[in-house]
Image: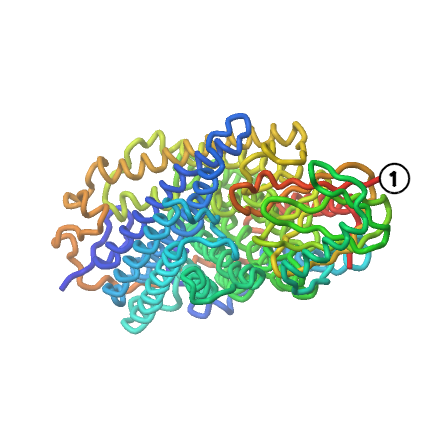
């Protein structure tokens, strides 16, 4: 009849809209505005907001910063990877490369850190488990996020951006002590 | 010279040139779907950790091919067929420039073949997104570029055809809502393909050494204007198909032309912004930009989908009630033709797109919530609800209708066709729900091994994550059986179905050879009249004409609200972070 025929009314845009549709549009619009408001509200009252602090960098420059931290604060080694315990409140660095998260970090519970993240080669995905915090790691960009680990324990860092054949072996660690 | 035929079964007119292009585009799409479906089996059986079928390199290769064939080649080829249908058949006009349309089609075929060859050769396992600086072979990018250019050419032929229809006055008044939806899809496609050119052309030049650096973040920002928007073409197209099938099956008319068209307009204006969904946890993207864009500017495109979610089933309900199916809230729905795959496919598409695809899309596209979802297997769960149970199932439903009408063959295995939407949709729903769950537990997408075999350090997912992935995979296998049934029925019907028109042979079905000249016996179809006015009825009136639909819509809203806030609560439990 109809959905595939031209509208019955020549001036269809002047045909009044039924009450049912108007009510639904009003309800849906209110819901859309609530969802829109939730994002700025969370920036004010919520505690999980991604930082927008980021810098352009190069693998060499970023690698040097990471090495500097490792040289200063390494406490031991695990499977050949340095375990680094930087002081609470400091800048801590992690780098992603084929196929490794480097180094292992040891943090203190309820202390804040300026956490830096960048990639030395391809794109990688920082996926902290089992808390389930996920961020994109992009070469040439250094992201800085203030994090406050609020539960002690051993956390895995998985790569969740495809980065080649060894992607699945890219597992890192963050320890959070009391 | 006569160039039209009238389909005696449906009353649709087909233009000789356009009909051939509809067939070849649809067939090429189905071939891509077949490839995607075969590869899907490899993906599913590898991600099912207890089976873990393929080695890592083959898995990533298969996953790349699956993504590109399903998300790009299948849907866009089929959409070209829909554009030619929505212009020439629905407006009863000739195709503007058949030669250009064929050129576009061949470019698409060359591009699709070239890209598939690149993936098959094994050095382009870069996933559909091909994120720089990971590099594929040059013909991987070139294939995509040629495919996109070909699609653009066919889209311009579609626009030209609209002009022809208007100038030759083949219809009265405004274009039907279905054509309006197709125009929306085509406009979004132009934007999409332009974005694709902006990023893929330099990436191609980089792959052959003319450019030495592609900024990885810039690539992501522009690529997603292609990657996400191309899925928005699907949304506009499959909503148009919902309207079409509601009209054909029930004689439904839009509850309000104004409201439905306005909702489409919102798509054109705001769906474009969704590339932001993919860069919410990327470095250096400002908060204001993310909030404005990820919400499609205050969720106005979500509003549009919520409107279609009411008006499509609402229009069916009104039509059914006019036929006397007036008992209670849901007699109209209970007595719908559930055994007809055209209806069941369309309705499952509508419900799963709304409840699963829409809600999860908004949730994970919320700026902060994306932190707990980005790149987990939740993401493919979401887009299987939009592109597979939403778009693909709607296109399958349309195909069942087209076998007799366009291809002039009777459908074979009607009993299997009756079950097919339930097998395919049901399997997919299992896959989607359990992958959503696994994603919430942090299981990664695009990942070969949940056990991290060979890693220096260890991490163990919970036993529950393994169970969810296994059940999801079983759903996936079921869906592949459903998809295989679809291919069996459609290809089988074109080969062996009873000929409703004696000249509808193999070449006519598969390579677009025209039917016998005598079939095209109409020089100019009758002018397409406006839909008849309803007796004593103007607009959709003052009352609640579709109360059952309204209840369903409220159910969607409640599910939406509850699920949305559950995710905020979950987010509140992770480590505090900020700037």
Subunit under mark 1:
A
Residue B5 in sight in this render: yes
Image quadrant containing the N terminus of chain B: bottom left
Q: Residue at x 72, y 43 (%)?
A: B566
Q: Could one spot residue B548 in this view of the protein?
A: no
Query: Where does the C terminus of chain B fall, quadrant-wise?
Result: bottom right
- The answer to which image quadrant residue A84 occupies is top right
Q: Which residue is mark 1?
A: A178
From this viewpoint, which residue is outermost toward the top? B50
Label 1: state its secondary structure.
loop
Percent across and percent down for residue B102 are: 25, 60
- Residue extending furthest toward the bottom: B167
Of residues A162 and A76, the one drawn nearer to the viewer in this rendering: A76
Q: Is residue A156 left or right of residue B236?
A: right
Relative placement, left or right, of B426 versus A134 is left
Eyeballing the image, is B192 above or below B362?
A: below
Residue B201 in picture, x, y percent from top left: 43, 65
> How are the residues colored?
rainbow
Q: Residue at x 37, y 59 (%)?
A: B142
């Amino acid at each position: 009849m109809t959905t595939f025929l031209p509208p019955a009314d020549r001036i269809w845009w002047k045909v009044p809209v039924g009450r049912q549709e108007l009510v639904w549009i009003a309800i849906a619009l209110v819901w859309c505005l609530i969802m829109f408001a939730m994002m700025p509200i969370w920036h004010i009252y919520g505690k999980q907001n991604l930082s927008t602090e980021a810098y352009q960098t190069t693998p060499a420059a970023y690698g040097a910063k990471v090495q500097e931290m490792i040289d200063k604060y390494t406490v031991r080694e695990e499977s050949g990877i340095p375990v680094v315990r930087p002081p609470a409140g400091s800048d801590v660095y992690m780098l992603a490369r084929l196929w490794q998260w480097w180094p292992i970090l040891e943090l203190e519970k309820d202390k804040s850190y300026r956490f830096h993240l960048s990639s030395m080669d391809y794109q990688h995905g920082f996926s902290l488990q089992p808390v389930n915090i996920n961020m994109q790691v992009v070469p040439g960009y250094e992201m800085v996020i203030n994090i406050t680990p609020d539960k002690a324990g051993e956390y895995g860092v998985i790569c969740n951006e495809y980065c080649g054949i060894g992607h699945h072996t890219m597992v890192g660690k963050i320890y959070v002590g009391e | 010279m006569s160039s039209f035929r009238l389909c005696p079964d449906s009353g649709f007119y087909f233009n000789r040139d356009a009909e051939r292009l509809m067939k070849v585009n649809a067939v090429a799409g189905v071939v891509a779907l077949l490839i995607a479906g075969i590869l899907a089996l490899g993906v599913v059986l590898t991600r099912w950790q207890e089976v873990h079928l393929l080695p890592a390199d083959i898995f990533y290769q298969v996953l790349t091919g699956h993504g590109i064939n399903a998300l790009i080649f299948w849907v866009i080829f089929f959409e070209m067929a829909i554009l030619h249908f929505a212009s020439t058949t629905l407006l009863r006009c000739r195709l503007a420039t058949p030669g250009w349309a064929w050129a576009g089609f061949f470019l698409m075929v060359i591009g699709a073949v070239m890209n598939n060859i690149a993936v098959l050769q094994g050095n382009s396992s870069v996933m559909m997104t091909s994120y720089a600086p990971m590099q594929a072979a040059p013909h991987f990018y070139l294939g995509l570029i040629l495919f996109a250019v070909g699609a653009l050419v066919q889209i311009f032929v579609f626009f030209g055809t609209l002009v022809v229809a208007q100038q030759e006055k083949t219809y009265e008044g405004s274009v039907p809502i279905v054509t309006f939806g197709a125009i929306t899809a085509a406009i979004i496609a132009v934007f999409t393909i332009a974005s694709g050119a902006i990023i893929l052309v330099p990436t191609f030049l980089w792959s052959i050494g003319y450019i030495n650096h592609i900024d990885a973040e810039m690539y992501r920002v522009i690529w997603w204007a292609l990657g996400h928007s191309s899925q928005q073409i699907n949304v506009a197209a499959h909503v148009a198909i919902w309207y079409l099938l509601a009209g054909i099956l029930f004689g439904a008319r839009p509850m309000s032309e104004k409201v439905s068209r306005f909702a489409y307009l919102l798509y054109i204006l705001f769906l474009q912004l969704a590339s932001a969904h993919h860069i919410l946890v990327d470095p250096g993207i400002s908060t204001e930009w993310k909030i404005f864009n990820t919400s499609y500017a205050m969720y106005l495109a979500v509003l549009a989908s919520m409107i279609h979610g009411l008006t499509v089933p609402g229009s069916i309900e009104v039509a059914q009630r006019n036929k006397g199916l007036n008992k209670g809230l849901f007699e109209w729905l209970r007595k719908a033709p559930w055994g007809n795959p055209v209806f069941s496919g369309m309705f499952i598409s509508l419900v799963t797109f709304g409840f699963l695809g829409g809600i999860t899309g908004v949730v994970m596209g919320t700026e902060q919530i994306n932190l707990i979802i980005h790149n987990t297997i939740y993401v493919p769960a979401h887009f299987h609800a939009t592109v597979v149970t939403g778009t693909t199932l709607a296109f399958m439903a349309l195909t069942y209708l087209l076998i007799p009408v366009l291809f002039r063959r009777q459908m074979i295995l009607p009993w299997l066709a009756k079950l097919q939407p339930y097998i395919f949709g049901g399997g997919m729903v299992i896959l989607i729900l359990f992958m959503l769950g696994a994603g919430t537990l942090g299981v990664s997408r695009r990942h070969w091994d949940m056990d991290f075999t060979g890693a220096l350090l260890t991490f163990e997912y919970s036993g529950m994550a393994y169970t969810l992935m296994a059940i999801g995979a079983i759903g996936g296998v079921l869906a592949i059986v459903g998809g295989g049934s679809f291919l069996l029925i459609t290809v089988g019907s074109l080969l062996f179905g009873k000929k409703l028109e004696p000249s509808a042979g193999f070449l006519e079905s598969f390579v677009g050879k025209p039917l016998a000249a005598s079939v095209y016996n109409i020089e100019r179809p009758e002018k397409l009249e406006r839909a008849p006015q309803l007796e004593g009825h103007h607009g959709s009136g003052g009352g609640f004409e579709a109360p059952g639909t309204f209840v369903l819509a409220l159910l969607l809203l409640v599910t939406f609200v509850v699920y949305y806030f559950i995710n905020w609560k979950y987010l509140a439990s992770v480590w505090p972070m900020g700037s």
